[in-house]
Amino acid sequence: MLVGVLGLLPLAFTALPDPRVRPGSALIVWAVLGVAVYPALVVLGRWYVVGAERNERDTVDLERP
């Protein structure tokens, strides 16, 4: 999922106008990278940690007699 989302960003950025012609497009790139991608990475990381903790808890429950 992460590769799919982040892998498409360069493709999306090529659709933006050249920053030398339209300086605001560089701001859009940094806004997407700093505002949209970072929270998505935090949510994805949290989802992974919760799943790993659940797996550990289930494994411990199986080892107890």
Image (tube, helix red, strand yellow):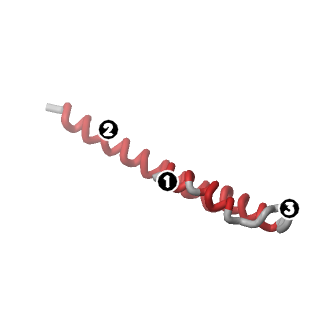
Disc 1 from disc 3: Cα separation: 29 Å
Q: Is residue 44 left or right of residue 10?
A: left
Residue on which disc 3 sits? 20
Which amino acid, by three-letter code, is at mark 1? Gly
- Of helix, strand and loop, which one carries label 2? helix
- Of helix, strand and loop, which one carries label 3? loop
- Of helix, strand and loop, which one carries label 1? helix
Which amino acid, by three-letter code, is at mark 3? Arg
Residue on which disc 1 sits? 4
Residue on which disc 2 sits? 56
Counting from the top left corner in percent of width and height, residue 44 is at: 48, 52
Q: Quadrant of the C terminus?
A: top left
Front one among 48 and 8? 8
Task: Residue at 67%, 60% (x, y): give it.
Answer: 13
Task: Residue at 83%, 68% (x, y): give it.
Answer: 22
Q: Answer with the quarter of the image where residue 31 lies.
A: bottom right
Counting from the top left corner in percent of width and height, residue 41 is at: 55, 52
Crowdedness of circle 3 by 10 Å Cα count: few (<14), some, many (20+)?
A: few
Nearer the camera: disc 2 or disc 1? 1
Which amino acid, by three-letter code, is at mark 2? Glu
Task: Residue at 43%, 52% (x, y): give it.
Answer: 47
Counting from the top left corner in percent of width and height, residue 43 is at: 50, 55
Q: Is 2 located above or below residue 31 in the figure? A: above
The answer to which of marks 2 and 1 sits earlier in the sequence is 1
Crowdedness of circle 2 by 10 Å Cα count: few (<14), some, many (20+)?
A: few
Nearer the camera: disc 1 or disc 3? 3
Front one among 64 and 12? 12
